């Protein structure tokens, strides 16, 4: 019943989405929550229907079929296939047990995973003292960014001492006008609002591969805190999100807040959320705002983003 439910839900997903509960991870595609569990369920189903030959097993990690892991049965020659490399009984039993463990842990959803305690002030000082100097350099002062949106102004206080790399990238993008006319293309009520794909496909492409290293998670993803989206380790580029609730479950996944909303959180929570996860990031990549304006005309957006010194 459990694997059938996950497979049924997975079949309805669009490109860039993932199985799992409503509160999905705010990532750049491909997203990954629930895929390993769903894959394990599919593999177990495969075991039930084809117990004699299951080599190699291709486990899909993420929404993109190119992101796979190959589990081989131990055949002596490379490139073994289902038809010529049957799996031994002992190997099947070992694999069955391992995958069953994945299903028990993964298919129940992220809510069952124990959460880390909120970072302490001591952890903040230890984690940031060296990195701030190396990464932020002379730009170590807290600064303000005003987002003039189609619904009203949002004032964000950015802290290099929380996440020096993210703070540096955010300021750079604001100062060149990257976020101007960017749509909040992913707004999930009671979870978060995501933005940061430029409406000009050429400019978006220019920055898409400019990934920067992760920062330590010093602050928690509380309501009003601002964090970069990610598709994995050291993969942040331009997309960020504003938390609409206490999303501390994101902390253990490496989402490190770099700022918080000082004014206008009510504006954030009033952004149009009627489209859910319908806007597809691959189409935004190709067509930019032309796609969003034609297919999702009610999306709210950043009119202009500017740095305001304190």
Image: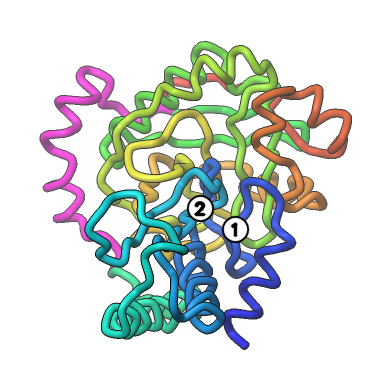
Query: Residue 206, how many percent across, how many down?
Result: 52, 14
Does the CB distance between marks 1 and 2 fall below 8 Å? yes
Q: Secondary structure at mark 2?
A: loop
Give the residue furthest to the front.
Answer: 84
Q: Is residue 131 left or right of residue 43?
A: left
Disc 1 target residue:
18
Query: Residue 211, how many percent across, how many down?
Result: 38, 28
Query: Residue 18, how many percent across, how many down?
Result: 59, 58
State whether residue 95 is above or below residue 206: below
Q: Residue at x 69, y 23 (%)?
A: 286
- Give the total of numbered labels: 2
In front of the other: 23 or 68:
68
State whether residue 167 is above or below residue 45: above
**Is disc 2 surrounded by few (<14), some (14 to 19) or many (20+) residues within 10 Å?**
many
Indicate whether residue 137 is drawn in magenta. yes
In front of the other: 186 or 106:
106
Q: Is residue 237 left or right of residue 95?
A: right
In space, the residues marked 1 and 2 are separated at their CA atoms by 7 Å
Location of the C terminus (image quadrant): top left
- Magenta part of the chain: 117-143
Which of the colour schemes (rainbow, by chain, secondary structure, one colour) is used?
rainbow
Disc 2 target residue:
62
Q: Splitting the image into 4 quarters, where does residue 196 fall?
A: top right
**Is disc 1 surrounded by few (<14), some (14 to 19) or many (20+) residues within 10 Å?**
many
Q: Is residue 87 left or right of residue 184?
A: left
Q: Residue at x 40, y 62 (%)?
A: 84
Q: Residue at x 50, y 43 (%)?
A: 66
């Amino acid at each position: 019943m459990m694997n059938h439910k996950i497979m049924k839900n997975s079949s309805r997903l669009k490109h860039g989405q993932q199985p799992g509960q409503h509160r999905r991870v705010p990532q750049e595609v491909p997203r990954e929550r629930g895929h390993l569990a769903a894959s394990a369920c599919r593999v177990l189903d495969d075991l039930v229907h084809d117990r004699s030959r299951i080599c190699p097993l291709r486990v899909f990690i993420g929404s993109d079929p190119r992101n796979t892991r190959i589990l081989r049965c131990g055949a002596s020659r490379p490139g073994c296939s289902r038809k010529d490399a049957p799996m031994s009984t002992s190997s099947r039993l070992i694999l069955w047990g391992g995958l069953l463990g994945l299903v028990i842990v993964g298919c129940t959803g992220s809510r069952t995973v124990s959460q880390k305690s909120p970072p302490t002030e001591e952890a903040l000082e230890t984690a940031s003292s060296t990195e701030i100097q190396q990464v932020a350099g002379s730009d170590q002062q807290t600064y303000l960014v005003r987002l003039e949106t189609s619904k009203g102004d949002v004032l964000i206080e950015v802290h290099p001492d929380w996440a020096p790399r993210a703070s540096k990238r955010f300021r750079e993008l604001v100062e060149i006008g990257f976020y101007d006319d960017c749509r909040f293309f992913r707004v999930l009520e009671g979870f978060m609002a995501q933005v940061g794909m430029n409406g000009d496909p050429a400019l978006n492409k220019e920055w898409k591969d400019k990934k920067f290293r992760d920062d330590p998670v010093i602050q928690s993803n509380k309501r009003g805190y601002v964090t970069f989206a990610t598709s994995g380790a050291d993969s942040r580029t331009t997309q960020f999100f504003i938390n609409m609730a206490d999303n501390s479950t994101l902390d253990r996944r490496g989402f490190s807040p770099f700022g918080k909303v000082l004014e206008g959180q009510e504006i954030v929570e009033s952004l149009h959320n009627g489209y859910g996860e319908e806007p597809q990031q691959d189409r935004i990549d190709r067509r930019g705002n032309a796609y969003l304006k034609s297919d999702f005309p009610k999306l709210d957006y950043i009119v202009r983003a500017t740095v305001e010194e304190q």
